[in-house]
Amino acid sequence: MSNDADNVRAALNGSIFMAPKGSSAPADLDSPWDAAWVDLGYMSDDGVSMEYSTDVESIGAWQSLSPVRRILTSVDMTLGFTAIELKARTITAYFPSSTITEVSGTVYRLDIPAAPAPAEFAFGLEWVDGDIKNRLVIPRGEITDRGAISLGRSKAVGLEMTVSAYASSAPEIATWLSNDPAWELAA
């Protein structure tokens, strides 16, 4: 097998979308995201981190020094990002079960509950590298971790969030579409 620099990819631009759980995602790379999917806007220049991990339980035997079997016990997938566009969808995502109301024509109020309810949504991630386009859809996820909101003179206010993917009724935890020619299966 040889190395091929043409198969090295970067996520030069992209978007994160959020929709009510059960929303239909585009089934291909060309269809637009429908109105249920809200683009969360600008993200910090760190981009998005995608993590996938598995845990296994090793089964040992008296007659063997090494495990005789390993059983998959859990799968975890997360997306991490920092939204720097402070708008209703990003603020209410960061503060679950919160509500924004208009106090007057130009003043708004955010009520942050002391005991927020669980809030599951569908999440979409799209990124491009030239003509290479990728879409990842998590049909069922929840923002399970939030970083500190830093306020300062030299950087944008950011809402750091981690989305945890949950299994849905399908056997997949997420679906990744790509038009990357390097993905072509060997004949």
Image (tube, grey):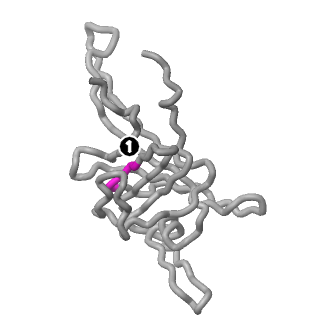
**Up/down of 156 relative to 107, above or below:** above
For the residue carrying disc 1, how many other residues have a C-alpha within 10 Å: few (<14), some (14-19), or many (20+)? some
**Which part of the image, by quadrant, shows the N terminus?**
top left
Residue sitting at x 58%, y 83%: 108
Residue sitting at x 27%, y 45%: 172
Q: Nearer the viewer, residue 142 or 171?
A: 171
Q: Position of residue 119 (x, y in %)?
A: 38, 64
Q: Is residue 48 left or right of residue 25?
A: right
Residue sitting at x 47%, y 43%: 50
Q: Please name the amino acid that badge 1 sits on.
A: Ser
**Up/down of 184 relative to 95, above or below:** above
Q: Nearer the viewer, residue 129 or 94?
A: 129
Q: Is residue 56 left or right of residue 82?
A: left
Q: Nearer the viewer, residue 22 or 12?
A: 12
Per the image, is 136 magenta?
Answer: yes
Q: Position of residue 132 (x, y in %)?
A: 45, 43
Q: Is residue 51 left or right of residue 21?
A: right
**Up/down of 96 relative to 184, above or below:** below
Q: Main secondary structure of the magenta part?
A: strand
Magenta stretch in the rendered image: 135-140
Q: Position of residue 31 (x, y in %)?
A: 34, 58
Q: Nearer the viewer, residue 72 or 128?
A: 128
Per the image, is 6 magenta?
Answer: no
Q: Which residue is mark 1?
A: 178
**Up/down of 128 relative to 113, above or below:** above
